[in-house]
Amino acid sequence: MFDNLSERLERSFKILKGEGKITEINVAETLKDVRRALLDADVNYKVAKTFTDTVKEKALGQNVLTAVKPSQLMVKIVHDELTALMGGEAVETNTTGGHPAVVLMAGLQGSGKTTFSSKLAKMLAEKRRQKPLLVACDVYRPAAIEQLKVLGEQIGVPVYTEDSHSPVDIARHAIAEARSRGNDVVIIDTAGRLAVDEQMMTEIAAIKEAVRPDEILFVVDAMTGQDAVNTAKEFNDRLDFTGVVLTKLDGDTRGGAALSIRTVVNKPIKFIGTGEKMEAIDTFHPSRMADRILGMGDIVSLVERAQEQYDEAEARRLSKKIAKNQFDFNDFLGQIHQIKKMGNLKELAGMIPGIGKSLKNLDIDDDAFKSIEAIIYSMTPKERTHPEILNSSRRSRIARGSGTTLQEVNRLLKQFDQTRKMMKMMTGSKATQLLAQMKHMGNMPGGMMPKAK
């Protein structure tokens, strides 16, 4: 996402490179290119014009310090204005106010409401220690109810369904059910249509009236570009929703919706969806998104994701095993799983400042750990715990069982052995520190980070 916009903006700032000072002429030339870049990214025309006018006004009013180049100052101003354009600050979602709190999901069919409802439920259960109840109110789309049931089972969250054809009744009964079961937040997944129509709007307005939700989240597919902004405006006119969710930001989207929607409907973007996995949900931080648009990475989000997976008690347990040279393939497998939970590998690497651009044309397979996992899973429990017993016949059997070659098995074992020796040298707090760094950097022990294809 935003790759093309980032490149265009970078080219625009080059106009000011080598210039001794900011003048009306070189600023006008730079911002003309910036405006074109925004329009190409499908940003609303009025939003793009207002944005560049504001940047111009601020740039011409600045005195360039000796230590700051004009191009650097322009990047700073554009960054600040991009942040303001997208809302300025992250906005919390109210899921603790009611008894239970009610979150109503709205949007067109195919925008990702059902999947996002499940992601939100998982996030609230794990991060806020709440007890969510998912409610299936899409009685029209084939298999919509079944899809929510499957996702609910996958994340361990109950799903309320009934045979009624009235979404209003289902929603109302679900609230009563939540109270009796002790659920403190109810997430209502509603029906969508291929386009905005009166029947759809009347129905969701009736649900809103019946359950009086604490939050109404409008879910929009970021890949629909400017159409997403127009649809958001129509929904907001009828529902007065409290926030926006942008899904599919991992796709080939130009990003115009993220930059326009906040200004057009005057409602904050609260969440973004960055993939199909249930963990692929992030709180929307305007300043961090501005960093990524301008090619500065997003190291704060990367560290937060690592911290979510970092278990201090587990790290202490592993440091004791490392001190006794007992770190085994079961522990190694656990580290791989925690890194995978952090998200798409290319996206994670792109959060590191200066790395994203170099990865643009590389295809990093999200299943890059698959062969390593296959080798470990082909070992017996005893072999995983005691790698030293892996003789040539056992290695040949593992290669056949994992669909890899003997050379790949030998390479993994050699690297694993080197890793154990290195870890043994770093006992106590240093070993715990190493484990933390492995997670923080999204790296594999012994240089076994998956390579780009």
Image (cartoon, rainbow, N blue to C red):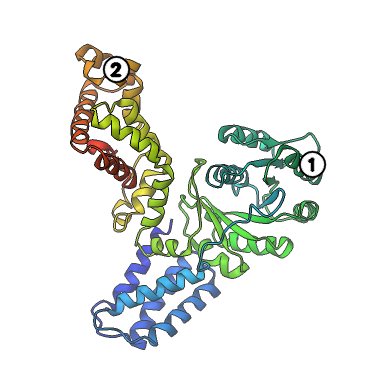
Relative to 239, 298 lies left or right: left
Q: Determine whether 49 is above or below 309 in the image.
A: below
Identify the residue position indicated by label 2 in the image.
383
Residue 17 falls left or right of residue 165: left
Question: Where in the figure is residue 404, as x and y percent of width and height?
Answer: 28, 23
Q: Earlier in the sequence, mark 2 or mark 1?
A: 1
Disc 2: CA contacts within 10 A as few (<14), some (14-19) or many (>=20): some
- Residue 133 visible? The answer is yes
Is residue 232 depicted above or below 33 in this figure?
above
Q: Of helix, strand and loop, which one carries label 1?
A: helix
Number of other residues with Cα within 10 Å of mark 1, as a class: few under 14, some 14 to 19, many 20 or more: some
| Image mark for residue 284 | none
Taking 311 as reference, is 4 above or below it?
Answer: below
Residue position marked by numbered label 1 in the rendering: 173
Q: Residue at x 67, y 41 (%)?
A: 133
x and y, in percent, of residue 34 in the image: 41, 73
Q: Residue 83's spot in the image, x, y percent? A: 46, 69
